[in-house]
Amino acid sequence: MTLAAPGGPDSPACPDDAVEVGRVTGAWGIQGGIRVAPFSKDPQALFATRTWFVLPPEAPVAGPRVAAAPLPRVLNVSRAREQGDAVVATARELPDRNAAEAMKGARIFVPRSAFPTAGDGEFYWIDLIGLAVVNRQGEALGTVTGLIDTGPHSVLRVARPDAPADASPDAAERLIPFVAAFVDNVSLADKRITVDWGLDY
């Protein structure tokens, strides 16, 4: 399903494999630069393509926001670099600071196909979402619904297949550290993760 965005009928829409990789937190500098908070500590997806797709905030942005023309559907990025824990960028579609300030809260998407190739034993979180998780005994533990970044490592959030509809969040999911001590194998082709984890953990 293609994601729609505001703009004219001839404006391009987000591609089917678009992944949200960051959000605009505000303007940067005086010449139309924006500051983007990436969703990954290693924001290489933002540097892998010069075409960023834009969707508006899901909810009203807190604080002052400049009223302007509809957000551009696409940013053709001319420069982008890391600055601290953010990425700062300029684009043709943002000619001045007012245009940049109007972008506050906008969601930035790039095609999954543009991501750099992951290294051996490395995976993008988006590729793990939806994978089935089984243990060494072949017992189904659930499906990956998300990941938690704890700093030292990530933790898989696995929805329990047997959880009742009214189960509390703690009872509805398993949290499995995504580390070699517990993860035996990740097969993207088979859409399965095999772990050393018991049904009663």
Image: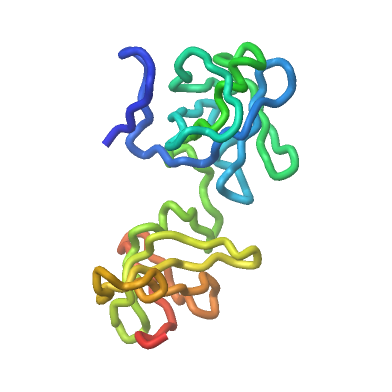
Foreground residue, 109 or 114?
A: 109
The percent coordinates of residue 150 (x first, y second) are 60, 65
> Is residue 10 shown left or right of residue 51?
left
Which image quadrant: the C terminus? bottom left
Marks counted in the figure total 0
Is 59 rendered above or below residue 185? Answer: above
> Is residue 84 shown left or right of residue 43?
right
Q: Quadrant of residue 28?
A: top right
The structure residue drawn at horizontal position 53% and vertical position 33%, both measured from the top left corner, is: 61
Is 199 rendered above or below residue 73? Answer: below
Is 86 rendered above or below residue 159? Answer: above
Is 20 rendered above or below residue 164? Answer: above
Q: Quadrant of residue 166?
A: bottom left
The percent coordinates of residue 27 (x first, y second) are 66, 25
> Is residue 124 shown left or right of residue 30?
left
Q: Quadrant of residue 170?
A: bottom left
The percent coordinates of residue 159 (x first, y second) are 34, 68
The structure residue drawn at horizontal position 41% and vertical position 54%, both measured from the top left corner, is: 127
Which image quadrant: the N terminus? top left
The percent coordinates of residue 92 (x first, y second) are 58, 14
The structure residue drawn at horizontal position 43% and vertical position 59%, both measured from the top left corner, is: 146
> Is residue 119 shown left or right of residue 27?
left
Foreground residue, 14 or 69?
A: 69
Q: How is the image coloured?
A: rainbow
The structure residue drawn at horizontal position 64% and vertical position 63%, both measured from the top left corner, is: 151
